[in-house]
Each structure stands twice: as C-alpha cells, then as structure tokens.
Image: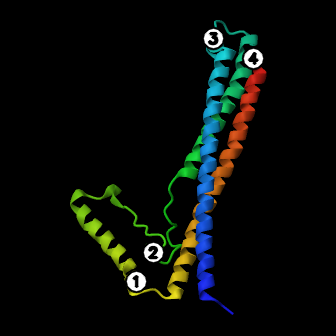
Amino acid sequence: MQNAEATLEHARFGITNAQETIRFIDAKIAVILSFLTFLVGQALTLADEIGLRELVRGDGCTWSRLLALLAVAVPVGALLVCLVKTACYCLDALTARPPEAGLARLTSCVLFPFLPDKGGNRRRGDAAVIELARIQSFRESFAKVSAGMENEEIAAEFADQCGVLGVILGKKMRACNRAIVWLLLSALALVLMHLVQ
C-alpha cells in the first residue's frame, strides 16, 4: 500500500541528506586546503635549508653538481606538480554548479529556483528586456505554488532535484577524492625532499 505523505517525507529526507553530504565534502576540502598551505610552507622552508638557490646559481658545470641539482630538482618538481594538482581539484570541488541541462523537466522549480544569468555577452540595451523575461519565467514556474500543487507534481520536483543533487554530489566527491590523492603525493614528495637534504 502506497502512502503519498510518507513518500514525500522520504524524498524530503533524501534532499536534506544530499545537501548535508555536499556541505561535508566542502568541509573536507577546507581541511585539505589547510594541509596544502602547511605543505607549501614546509616546502619553502626545506628549499631554503637545502640551499636550492645556491645550488642553481653555483659556478661551474661539474658532474657532481649536476647530479646534486638533479637529485633536488626531481622531488621539488614532483612536489610543485602535486601541489598545483591538489589546488586545482580543490577549486573544482568548491566551484558552484548549475543543474545539468536536460536533467530536470523544468528550468526552475520550487525546490531549486535556479535562474541562469546569461548576461556575460549581452548588449546593454537588451539587459532590461532579458531581465524582465527571466523574472516572467520565474513567476510562471512559481504560479503553481499559490494555485496549489498535486502530490504528483511535488514528487516530480523531488525526483528532478534528487537527480540534480546527485550529479553535483558525484562531481564534488570525485574532485575531493582526487584532491586527497594529490595531497598524499605532495606529502610523499616532501618526504623525498627531506631525504635529499
């Protein structure tokens, strides 16, 4: 036996759970960025202790100097690549994401009142007309709120919103996992720099 109220409550819980998970991933990214800042500071301190400037500016081109330079350059280069990749994945995880085109039945709904701003390449004269059209579209999609919504309409919006949040959550999780992997590789490169010292 189906219960419409229990189904809608379950969908409401699913939306809340997805949003909480997104917030948790954002908190993890903040922690990763803190560790990243720490690793950058450690890397700069270690590069100074190794005497990287003196090694690069040194006179002569002996085999021992070239080997020493190579022994330092490999872990430093690896560390730089890892730090940049970690930062890129952190930025990817924190980037605001609009709903996927074609995923939801409506461009704007009660659960996700998203109105894309397409003003990047519009002319100044058209700005007011475009803005009025956006507001009118918004009002039309929300007219059903004052008219009252059927359980099927509400369930359809929940289904669309779950799909939208699922895509956003998947992209954030993937970026967070990759940021963690590159952060660990950064730490490993820092350990290699310590061994070279």
> Could you tell me how far apart the alpha carbons at marks 3 and 4 are, in whole angstroms?
15 Å
- Tell me if residue 166 can be seen: no
**Along the polypeptide, which appears first: circle 1 or circle 3?**
3
Q: Are marks 2 and 1 in contact (CB under 8 Å)?
A: yes
Q: Which residue is mark 2?
A: 110
**Along the polypeptide, which appears first: circle 1 or circle 4?**
4
Q: Is residue 91 above or below residue 69?
A: below
> Could you tell me how far apart the alpha carbons at marks 2 and 1 are, in whole angstroms?
9 Å
Q: Residues within 10 Å of mark 2 (few under 14, many from 20)?
A: some
* Relative to 173, 132 lies left or right: left
Residue 161, given in percent of the width and then of the height, sits at 54, 72
Q: Is residue 20 above or below residue 39?
A: below
In front: mark 3 or mark 2?
2
* Relative to 10, 145 lies left or right: left
Residue 15, given in percent of the width and then of the height, sits at 58, 70
Q: Which residue is mark 1?
A: 144
Quadrant in the rendering for residue 39: top right
> Could you tell me how far apart the alpha carbons at marks 1 and 3 are, in whole angstroms?
72 Å
Question: Residue at 57% across / 62% down in the picture?
Answer: 168
Q: Is residue 40 above or below residue 100?
A: above
Q: Which residue is mark 3?
A: 54
In front: mark 3 or mark 4?
3
In front: mark 1 or mark 3?
1
Quadrant in the rendering for residue 127: bottom left
Q: Which residue is mark 4?
A: 67
In front: mark 1 or mark 4?
1
